[in-house]
Amino acid sequence: MALSHRIVSEESVQRYVTHASERCVQDLLAASRPELYDDWKLYRIKRGVEISRRSQGSVMLVRGRSFVDVPPSQIRSLASAIETAKQWDPSFVEGQYLRSVQENLDLLRLVFSGGAGPLFRNREFIVYERRETMDDGTQVIAVASLPRELAAGIYPEESKLVRGLLMQSGWVIEQVEQSDACIVTYVAQVDPAGWLPKWLVNILSVKLVLVIDDLYRLAQSFK
């Protein structure tokens, strides 16, 4: 049964997501340039993905970075398509487009598996997705949750799901000169909400950025 919610104005939604998504794009670009910050700590390298972490509040900010020998346009089209998400993200359950705010800015509903057992209910996120191509050709896909009040007005919460918070996430896809390869950076900071210890949340966030390799393998299958 859906939980009660109140209506929010279209103007307030558009104003928030426009400014928040622009800021998220800049944050992702900064995170993709390791030379700008010295507080990223290398955690491990697994499946060709360099995984780093940075303390930011109670939930760790995690970054995955990898060289992939497929064109940037192919990575972008797969990373931003709900229809193919199940093929490269094993935790993805379902998603839907809720509305378009601008040509390159949409509101989405995403549901991810919480795992087995009663403490691990599926997590739902009401997010914006902004897609930008920068002057140098770098492509950015910025995804983050709307504030709870705005999200509830757009799509009511369901009692069988836990509504989590994507505090910051997204992709930065940089063309490697004179090749069809690119460097892919994926950043995630997720608060799944509900009853989960912070140490487990941080472990799950580290696993999350390994989807870079899953996405790469899917892209390769289309070559």
Image (tube, rainbow, N blue to C red):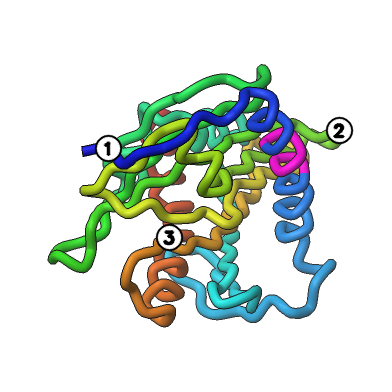
User: Magenta residues?
Assistant: 17-22
Q: Quadrant of the N terminus?
A: top left
Location of mark 2 (residue)? 135
Q: In this view, does 6 lie above or below 169?
A: above
Q: Position of residue 146 (x, y in %)?
A: 56, 44
Location of mark 1 (residue)? 2
Q: Which amino acid is tagged 1?
A: Ala
**Residues at marks 2 and 3, CA–CA distance in whole angstroms:** 29 Å
Q: Where is residue 73 in the image (x, y as percent from the top left)?
A: 60, 29
Residues 4 and 211: in front is 4
Q: Residue 208 carries which label?
A: 3
Are circles 2 and 3 on residues that touch, CB within 8 Å? no
Classify mark 2: residues with Cα within 10 Å, few (<14), some (14-19) or many (20+): few
Q: In this view, does 30 lie above or below 86?
A: below
Q: Which amino acid is tagged 2?
A: Asp
Q: How many labels sit on residues?
A: 3
- Left or right, 77 with respect to 204, comes to right
Quarter holding residue 221:
top left
Are circles 1 and 2 on residues that touch, CB within 8 Å? no
- Left or right, 111 with respect to 32, comes to left
